[in-house]
């Protein structure tokens, strides 16, 4: 199992931060366009436990793939967790934590994942997957800075 952990300071109130990130409709805005991220289902304004979201993504070589996630846990204003039900990973568990701090909110993402294909998955992790995930979260960091911190 691999794990990616990212922290970011957001100059916003907890309510503003939670409102933005708890709306699945905003996910496309913080995802790089080259990922071909497209939501395939009608979405409510706010997520809820048990909510299933189906996307099309193009993680490698511009090949479209279906990714289905479930919002597994929601603790209003504190954290939510999404888990993959179908997609490119053998297992994907993404925790989104929000903590009020002086002047804003500290957001922490913890992604725990297992790649498919056994030894082949282990081989491609450092060559392709780890770098792709870092790139996606770096894009997200910059976009959040732009949206909330005016940078």
Image: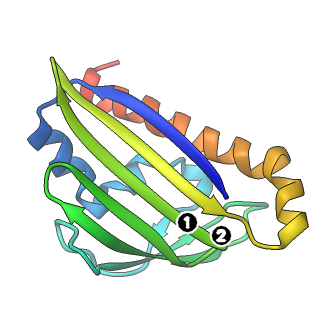
Q: How crowded is mark 2: few (under 14 residues within 10 Å), some or many (20 or more)?
A: some
Q: Is residue 111 left or right of residue 71?
A: right
Residue 40 x, y percent position in the rendering: 43, 79
Residue 108 x, y percent position in the rendering: 37, 39
Q: How crowded is mark 1: few (under 14 residues within 10 Å), some or many (20 or more)?
A: many
Q: In this view, does 24 lie to the left or right of 37?
A: left
Label 2 element class: loop
Residue at the image point whose x is 76% and y is 72% from the top: 116
Residue 21 x, y percent position in the rendering: 27, 50
Work out whether residue 110 or residue 150 is closer to the camera in this orientation and state it.
110
Q: How many labels does the image show?
A: 2
Q: Which residue extends farthest front? A: 1
The tag on residue 92 is 1
- List the residue tagged with mark 2: 89
Quarter where residue 147 is shown: top left
Q: Quadrant of the C terminus?
A: top left
Quarter where residue 44 is shown: bottom left
Tell me whether the residue at label 2 lies in contact with that at label 1, contact meaning CB atoms closer than 8 angstroms: yes
Residue 104 x, y percent position in the rendering: 18, 25
Colouring method of the image? rainbow
Label 1 element class: strand
Residue 91 in the image: above or below residue 142:
below
């Amino acid at each position: 199992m691999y794990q990616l952990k990212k922290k970011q300071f957001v100059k916003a109130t907890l309510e503003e931060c939670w409102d933005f990130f708890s709306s699945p409709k905003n996910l496309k805005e913080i995802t790089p366009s080259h990922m071909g991220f497209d939501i395939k289902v009608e979405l409510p304004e706010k997520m809820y436990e048990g909510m299933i979201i189906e996307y099309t993504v193009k993680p490698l070589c511009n090949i479209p793939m279906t990714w289905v996630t479930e919002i597994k846990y929601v603790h209003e204003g504190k954290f939510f967790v999404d888990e993959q039900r179908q997609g490119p990973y053998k297992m994907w568990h993404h925790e989104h934590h929000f903590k009020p701090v002086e002047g804003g909110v500290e957001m922490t993402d913890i992604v725990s994942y297992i790649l498919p294909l056994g030894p082949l998955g282990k081989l491609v992790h450092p060559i392709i997957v780890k770098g792709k995930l870092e790139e996606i979260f770096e894009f997200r960091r910059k976009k959040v800075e732009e949206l909330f911190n005016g940078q």
